Image: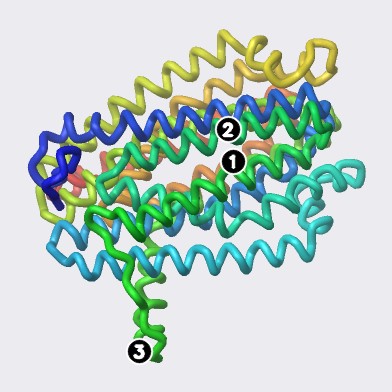
Amino acid sequence: MTTDHRDAIDFAHEPVGRLFRRMLLPTLIGMLSIVVLNLTDGAFIGHGAGSEALAAINIAAPIFNILAAIALMFGVGCSVVASIHLSRGKRKAANINVTQALIGSVLLALVVSVLILTHLGDTCRLFGSNERLVPLASSYLRWIALAEPLITLDVVGRFLVRLDGSPRFASACAVVASGLNIVLDYLFIFPLGWGLEGAAIATSISFSLTALAQVAYLVWWPRTFRLYRLRLTRKSLWLTLRNLGYQVRMGASAMLGEMAICGSTVVGNFVFIRYLGEDGVAAYGVACYCLPVIYMMASAIVQSAQPIVSFAYGAAHGVRLRESRRLMLRWATAAGAALSLAMWWGAPLITRLFLPTSAPAYALSAAGLPYYALSILPVTLCVVLIGYMQSVEQAARATIYTLLRGFVIIVPAFLLLPPLIGTLGIWLAPAVAETLTLLIMAAAVLWRRRVQHDKGGQF
């Protein structure tokens, strides 16, 4: 997977540490730009549209996570499959899978968008909204759903551009989208007074434009991939469905990981509104705005390592696999610990970014965030370990652990802890769920090592 371009990336021979750093820096820059966007977006909404708008966007956020999950499923699945094909010299198969992923993801996103647009109010109620917040949440969701096919294309395209050996271009697209979104957020929310709806329009415009830029790259300037003209015969359609099914299987845990954010947010919304009312949902909204920061950091590690790991796995390079895994865990530990300490000590400052100190939700958030911070390190480690499993075609194990952390443990934690220890239990529920999942993963590794030798350096 090499070219004569001076920036070409050699996944087969370049030292793993150097290769990882080359992938990580632009990926991290792109992720951080989205983090800055996320925080700025929340600050503009909280101060420009009020705490009710912040609560409303926390209702719509899980729905947005579902839409993002579709894109991640195809992006991760296709990237893993295409990496393995390239490592085995099957370039045509890689090109076909790339093309199928782009078309399939956009079509599925279009179907989901239509369903949401035709049931806006019911969708918001399903995700925890009361009647007072339905109009606000619907106004935000409408514009996001309209642009969702292009937003999906942006996410999937970024995976493919990075795998094609152009992480800087993928990073530039993320930076441009974030910068444009921040500028439009300010214009639409403050001078024009469009409120929450303006924030949604800004997001839709920004990421639609960078989606088109990435499509242009894949059509006219790719290094490795070439979009393949698919046939419309019965056999070709059947093979397309088969390939998409395998990509979905490989990316299912990534989708479920995004759905895990959705699940914890939805259950948290219901529990917070039950115990603390709309102010509680707004306070929880601050934590939910910070959650993507944590996931972005973990995702930057996973997405930077994934082409390296999948290529080494396809080429049966056990030493490079083990080295990649150690790098991922070291970075995850350092990043998780740093973010946890930052939220623990900076809870009041973080809350002031989103809410005025006079708002009732401010005190709830400032008091609760330090306990929420306890979840950050186990979250980061869980996401990175699951990402490694995805990269080596261990889809079933990755899916099981994602279901554990995202649904099986978190829901009982949210429901059982508040009656036992009060509202503090709501803030601690994510930490309990993530820590238990990490302990189960560690126990599974120890058990496997007892019953068989470590084959090829894989978990």
Front of the two marks 1 and 3 = 3
Residue 433, horizontal then vertical, whole percent: 54, 36
> Could you tell me which secondary element the residue under label 2 belongs to?
helix
- Three-letter code, disc 3: Lys
Q: In this figure, which residue is indicated by the disc labeled 3?
A: 235
Query: Residue at horizontal 57%, vertical 59%?
Result: 149
- Three-letter code, disc 1: Ile
Residue 233, horizontal then vertical, whole percent: 39, 90
The correct choice, above or below, for 246 with respect to 201 in the image is below
> Could you tell me which secondary element the residue under label 3 belongs to?
helix
Return the mark for residue 410.
1
Asked if residue 396 can be seen in this view, the reply is no
Give neighbour class at mark 2: few <14, some 14-19, many 20+ (Cα, 10 Å): many
Earlier residue among tags 3 and 2: 3
Work out how far the residue at label 3 is from the one at label 2, CA to CA, in angstroms. Answer: 47 Å
Earlier residue among tags 2 and 1: 1
